[in-house]
Amino acid sequence: MDVTSADSAAGSSAVKHIAVLTSGGDAPGMNAAIRAVVRKAVYHGLRVSGVKHGYAGLIRGEVESMDLGSVADIIQRGGTKLFTARCKEFETDAGQEQAVRVLRDHAIDALVVIGGDGSFRGARALAHRGVKTIGIPGTIDNDIPCTDYTIGFDTAVNTVIEAIDKIRDTATSHERTYVIEVMGRNAGDIAMIAGLAGGAESILIPESPFDLKMVLEKLKHGVSRGKRHSIILVAEGVGHGMKIGEQIAEQTGWEVRVTVLGHLQRGGSPTAFDRVLASRMGAMAVDLLRAGRTSEMIGVRGSHIVATDIDEALATPRQIDLSVYELAGILSL
Ligand code: ADP
Ligand code: F6P
């Protein structure tokens, strides 16, 4: 259903007081999403509160009122002003019941959850307990179905590209092979897109089984046509970059260096793409709640911001676009 018509059919907002929280791994652009939720809610005359430390803070009652000024000067900042956490207790009935009590005690009738798929499972649990809940995908991994992009992915990819470019300078100078391990517990998106954009000679992702012998054949072919250095990008979901570097050194006798980019990929000022995506998704979350909608996640398809039922989203297998992976392979021959 179209959000605007659902809203006007309702006559007035279905909710009066919205809360927002961030959960799971932080991602650049989460602040821009918080800002959008707060400002769009205020624009429509709603009360809005922030919950600190994700579901852990919700259980503990860490709720504070927010206004236009609470989200000033954060659109450009990485991390999350509301802090984030992982919380085992929230996965239990007792934890969820306590969370619902806290929301009721603060007269909060709707919640926006910004996080990854784990956080969406939590959002779904609350929705099943009668709390109007909408999820916004915020994770650098880009591993959520029913959206082309998650908030933070573009920034992380740009961070990785910057690192690849710098490492390539020293790799060309010393004529060495470099392995760079990037984040992506179960997803190869960061490795695939940053690898294509950074011209990596080889990209290893969990979605595509690889044979190290074939990888080495390709690198040797490069050497035979005059390549003096190579960069191999490894998604952490494939295994430890250090181990892969050791195997390459053992099997080729080449001098190999390994860089694990780690958590620096999660920080930094969000790109314009992530700020705009977060702003549009945050505003859409408020529109959905005003229209009485619940248990949905927001996504972007092409240039459109869309909503999908959370149950459906969580049951949909996440698919990476392997044609992009193949292209990266062809262009790095
Ligand atoms: P992400 O949201 O980045 O995927 P996690 O998987 O760590 O991060 O999940 C964040 C939090 O969401 C967890 O610490 C937990 O509080 C909550 N959560 C995860 N899975 C569930 C679940 N099945 N039911 C209820 N809450 C969940
Ligand atoms: O944010 C997603 C992610 O970066 C994964 O790629 C990674 O495995 C994980 O989070 C690590 O997070 P943490 O160190 O906070 O547990």
Image (spheres, rainbow, N blue to C red):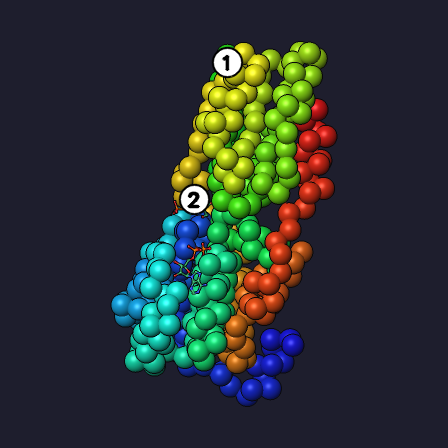
Asked which secondary structure carries label 1, the reply is loop
Q: How many marks?
A: 2
Closer mark to the observer between disc 1 and disc 2: 1
Q: Which mark is residue 255?
A: 1
Percent coordinates x, y for residue 204 in the rendering: 59, 34
Q: Amino acid at mark 1?
A: Glu
Judge left or right: residue 318 versus residue 247: right
In the image, residue 288 above or below residue 71: below
Other-residue count near label 1 (Cα within 10 Å), few / some / many at <14 / 14–19 / ≥20: some
Looking at the picture, tell me which residue is in the foreground, 124 or 191.
124
Percent coordinates x, y for residue 329 in the rendering: 69, 31
Ligand 2 within 8 Å of disc 2? The answer is yes
Labelled pair 1, 2 in contact (Cβ < 8 Å): no
Question: Residue at horizontal 60%, vertical 81%?
Answer: 6
The mark nearer the N terminus, 1 or 2, is 1
Question: Residue at horizontal 67%, vertical 38%?
Answer: 325
Percent coordinates x, y for residue 163 in the rendering: 48, 30
Question: Residue at horizontal 54%, vertical 20%?
Answer: 248
Toward which corner of the image does residue 293 lie, by quadrant? Answer: bottom right
Instruction: Check disc 2 and report the residue beneath it.
Output: 266
In the image, residue 165 above or below residue 175: below
Percent coordinates x, y for residue 322 in the rendering: 69, 43
Other-residue count near label 2 (Cα within 10 Å), few / some / many at <14 / 14–19 / ≥20: many
Ligand 2 within 8 Å of disc 1? The answer is no
Toward which corner of the image does residue 297 lie, by quadrant? Answer: bottom right
Which corner quadrant holds the C terminus?
A: top right
Judge left or right: residue 144 versus residue 325: left
